[in-house]
């Protein structure tokens, strides 16, 4: 039997055993669909987290005073950049958008009337420049109540979840107890002017934004800031950007340039753990798909032992029969994988455009990811290509063993099979 | 903040003492010097109880402490929840030991501002260092009666920015030179903490306040009550007690 006749016969057999073909292809298609969905969501979480970190929390990279990074969790004001304007100018001259911020820790204290009850909560304060913070961050776009900050005012914008937790509304007075740069206890008496619902849960849960000149006055910063953040790409660490910044700032002693990944070590640590976990999840999805496919391929070949015996009795060589059956398996793989990635594409379209709303679950979770509610998938061509190729290969490989077993049986035994 | 900066807190923890001294027409500096001269013994050993009250309820911790001179103190918690936890204050540093983790931690920088066991006392309140007069400019604001005792009202204003409280007012007993009340303010002028001292007794030749209540002026129903249950002065205390090796035993 020549190759063309073999392909034609295999193709014909696919439709002659239509029900078997559909069952086997369906198992494969379902496995690949789950694989594509899982991969899309897992990658989507990473993409959203990185974007929400960069746009709302860290910028693409930051300039910090030497020593600050090691104690960053404690928000020490003693490591400050003394000449932020000069650094901002140097960066902007080379086309890098930069904004200064002063970050401090404090205890937010509220009193009953107008608040529902007395209370206090640890917060992170951000002194921001209302006029150019938008060059790097997207905070202003997320104001859902009230307004954005104005320079010099004793006003504050609260993260949405924080406002919800303490029962804050626009116009309510708040007190923040903190320390000045030198170490004095200090209180900031502020009015809530706005509430920001950002997609970053850390900002939503803990952030209080005040004008940077207000922070400068109360914290005795005398023009110094804790960080200068820059805009950059929203996916992955922009090494070219940090290298350019280091070059531009070579003449400024006592400052470090750090990418966003070093400012979000909690996320980086969990992402590394997740990556190995994700690989395991995807591996198991594949194993389940392979088991389903191999089972149906096995059954379809064993059911055809009589037919195989007949073909051998008619003089077909084992090699020709093996090629025929493996071609049939490959055909099933192509059909199943094709259906799988087609269904995956349709499903992924909805995951990418609409996503799945997990806000009820994520509201109380603090797992390092910067996502607040709707988890969206992403398009990844490599996943579709590898799913298709793997689907076909798995089907052919899983067909090899039952084919071999069927061909080991004598013709007489094969023909006796019911 | 330096121990001397908060003054009252550190003093009561490490045995606040005072000797009766006749005084007339003293300047603020002289009053504070007498206050300080009565705060430090050669050695002391004490057991104490700390009750922290806040909106979550009431928590009681007990502890045993040893100190030598002005700057070296060891506290070991004895209450069940914290049993075995130790705080060692040496001349320049504070170390914590957690028996469950068998871990020794040196506190530094902003970490010193953390609260000790959720109380109104921070670790920096316990750090040694400069005297009150080195840290603060003082001014005699007059005399007032506190709980029936005549007191000097002394204003403290920080000389440098690394003190925790830029301004304090302390009421010092005119006869015993022991503080009976203190108020601590933020840079903005807002009252942050009020401290009341009572149960003043003379033990072993020293006059001490056996109870101190620290109230957070910004939080209703939030206070820390610190009581010296038993105290001994000028006893034999082995230097090895204050070593890092001993801390982790």
Image (cartoon, coloured by chain):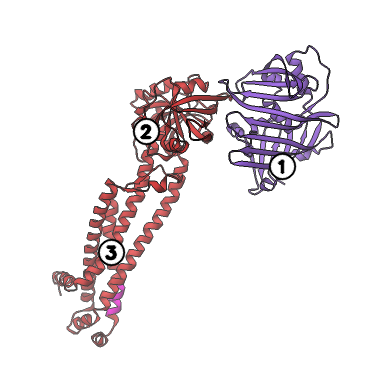
| Residue B74 picture quarter | top right
**Measured Cα–Cα span from mark 3 to mark 1:** 66 Å
Tell me where the magenta segment starts and ends, as one range: A400-406
Task: Kindly identify which chain the residue marked by label 3 belongs to.
Answer: A
Mark 1: secondary structure: strand
Q: Which chain is red?
A: A
Q: Nearer the viewer, mark 2 or mark 3?
A: 3
Task: Kindly identify which chain the residue marked by label 1 belongs to.
Answer: B
Look at the numbered discs 3 and 1 and tell me whether their residues touch, using CB distance below 8 Å: no
Q: Position of residue A207 (x, y in %)?
A: 45, 33
Decide: is A281 above or below B87: below
Decide: is A90 above or below B61: above
**Colour representing chain B:** purple
Q: Do callouts 3 and 1 point to residues on the same chain?
A: no
Packing grade of label 2 (10 A; few <14, some 14-19, many >=20) is some
- Residue at label 1? B62
Residue located 21% across and 63% down the image: A335
Q: Position of residue A352 (x, y in %)?
A: 28, 47
Q: Do callouts 2 and 3 point to residues on the same chain?
A: yes
């Amino acid at each position: 039997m020549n190759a063309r006749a073999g392909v034609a016969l295999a193709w014909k057999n696919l439709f002659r055993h239509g029900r078997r073909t559909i069952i086997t292809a369906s198992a494969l298609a379902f496995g690949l669909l789950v694989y594509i969905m899982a991969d899309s969501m897992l990658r989507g979480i990473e993409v959203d987290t990185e974007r929400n970190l960069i746009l709302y929390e860290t910028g693409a990279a930051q300039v910090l005073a030497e020593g600050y990074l090691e104690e960053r969790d404690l928000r020490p004001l003693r490591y400050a950049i003394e000449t932020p304007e000069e650094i901002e100018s140097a960066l902007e001259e080379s086309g890098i958008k930069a904004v200064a911020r002063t970050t401090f820790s404090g205890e937010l204290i509220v009193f009953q009337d107008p608040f529902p009850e007395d209370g206090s909560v640890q917060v992170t304060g951000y002194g921001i420049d209302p006029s150019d913070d938008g060059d790097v961050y997207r905070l202003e776009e997320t104001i859902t109540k009230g307004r954005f900050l104005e320079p010099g005012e004793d006003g504050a914008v609260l993260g949405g979840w924080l406002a919800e937790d303490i029962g804050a509304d626009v116009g309510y007075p708040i007190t923040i107890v903190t320390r000045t740069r030198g170490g004095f206890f200090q209180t900031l008496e502020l009015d809530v002017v706005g509430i920001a619902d950002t997609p970053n849960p850390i900002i939503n849960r803990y952030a209080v934004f005040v004008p940077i000149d207000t922070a400068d006055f109360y914290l005795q910063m005398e023009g110094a800031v804790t960080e200068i953040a820059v805009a950059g790409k929203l996916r992955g660490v922009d090494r070219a950007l940090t290298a350019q910044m280091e070059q531009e700032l070579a003449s400024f002693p006592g400052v470090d340039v750090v990418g966003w990944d070093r400012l979000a070590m909690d996320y980086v640590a969990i992402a590394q753990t997740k990556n190995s976990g994700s690989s395991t999840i995807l591996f198991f999805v594949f194993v389940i798909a392979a088991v389903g496919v191999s089972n149906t391929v096995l059954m379809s070949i064993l059911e055809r032992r009589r037919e195989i015996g007949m073909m051998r009795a008619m003089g077909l060589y084992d090699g020709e029969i093996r090629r025929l059956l493996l071609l049939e398996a490959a055909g099933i793989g192509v059909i199943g994988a094709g259906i799988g990635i087609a269904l995956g594409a349709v499903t992924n379209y909805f995951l990418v455009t609409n996503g799945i709303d997990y806000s009820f679950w994520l509201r109380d979770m603090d797992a390092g990811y910067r996502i607040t509610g709707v988890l969206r998938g992403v398009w990844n061509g490599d996943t579709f290509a590898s799913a298709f190729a793997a689907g076909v290969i798995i089907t052919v490989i899983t067909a090899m063993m039952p084919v071999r077993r069927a061909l080991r049986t004598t013709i007489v035994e094969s023909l006796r099979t019911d | 903040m330096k121990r001397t900066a908060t003054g009252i807190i550190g003093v009561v923890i490490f045995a606040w003492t005072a000797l009766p001294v006749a005084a007339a027409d003293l300047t603020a500096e002289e009053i504070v010097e007498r206050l300080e001269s009565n705060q430090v013994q050669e050695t002391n050993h004490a057991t104490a109880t700390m009750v922290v009250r806040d909106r979550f309820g009431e928590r009681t911790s007990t502890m045993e402490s040893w100190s030598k001179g002005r700057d070296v103190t060891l506290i070991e918690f004895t209450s069940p929840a914290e049993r075995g936890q130790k705080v060692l204050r040496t001349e320049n540093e504070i170390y914590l030991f957690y028996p469950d983790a068998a871990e020794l931690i040196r506190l530094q920088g902003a970490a010193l501002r953390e609260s000790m066991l959720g109380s109104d006392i921070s670790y920096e309140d316990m750090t040694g260092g400069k005297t009150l007069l080195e840290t603060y400019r003082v001014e005699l604001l007059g005399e007032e009666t506190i709980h029936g005792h005549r007191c000097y009202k002394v204003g403290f204003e920080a000389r440098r920015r690394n003190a925790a409280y830029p301004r304090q007012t302390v009421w010092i007993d005119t006869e015993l030179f022991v503080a009976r009340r203190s108020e601590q303010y933020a840079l903005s002028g807002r009252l942050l903490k009020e401290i009341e001292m009572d149960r003043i007794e003379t033990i072993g030749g020293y006059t001490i306040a056996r109870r101190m209540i620290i109230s957070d002026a910004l939080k209703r129903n939030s206070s820390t009550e610190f009581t010296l249950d038993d105290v001994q002065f000028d006893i034999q205390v082995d230097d090895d007690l204050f070593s890092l090796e001993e801390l982790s035993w």
